[in-house]
Amino acid sequence: QVQLAESGGGLVQAGGSLRLSCTASGSILSLNSMGWFRQAPGKQRELVAGITTRTGIANYAVSVKGRFTISRDLAKNTVYLQMNSLKPEDTAVYYCTGGRDWGQGTQVTVSS
């Protein structure tokens, strides 16, 4: 079992950028992949982006492709989500996940 801790959320204006971090308590190589999900009020949790830990192959939701970039730093056991050109509809709680583990979530609010 790996504990995951997110950071980097906050309030930003539309068009702005944020970078989320997810640090694992152990080696992320023990996980095949990691990902970021988000959940907006009244909506289901949805996958935003995922990445394989060994090869770094990434995949994205259509809604964020070209704006968000997921990456990982094996030495720091950390996965990042760089979010550019943010839109109000990106407002949500963002969760990091790996294996069966989830972080506590970090709030991202984009004002118009």
Image (cartoon, helix red, strand yellow):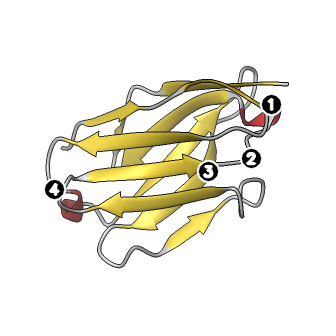
Q: Residues within 10 Å of mark 1 (few under 14, many from 20)?
A: some
Q: Which residue carries the number 1 mark?
A: 88
Q: Which residue is mark 4?
A: 27
Q: Which tag, 1 or 4, sits closer to the chain's start?
A: 4
Question: Residue 9 at x, y = what percent?
Answer: 51, 28
Q: Quadrant of the N terminus?
A: top left
The amino acid on which the numbered mark 1 sits, given as a three-letter code, is Pro
Residue 42 coordinates in the image, percent (x, y):
76, 21
Side (left or right) of 14 relative to 17: right
Position of 91 with respect to 80 (left or right) is: right
> Who is closer to the viewer here, 93 or 7?
7
Residue at 56% from the left image edge and 43% from the top image edge: 37
Q: Quadrant of residue 63?
A: bottom right
Give the residue at mark 2: 85
- Element type at marker 4? loop
Q: Residue under circle 3?
A: 48
Residue in view at x 38 percent, y 33 percent: 6
First in residue order: circle 2 vs circle 3: 3
- Mark 4 belongs to which amino acid? Ser
* Residues at marks 1 and 4, CA–CA distance in whole angstroms: 34 Å
- Could you say where residue 70 lies in the image, as x and y percent from the top left? 50, 59
Q: Secondary structure at mark 3?
A: strand
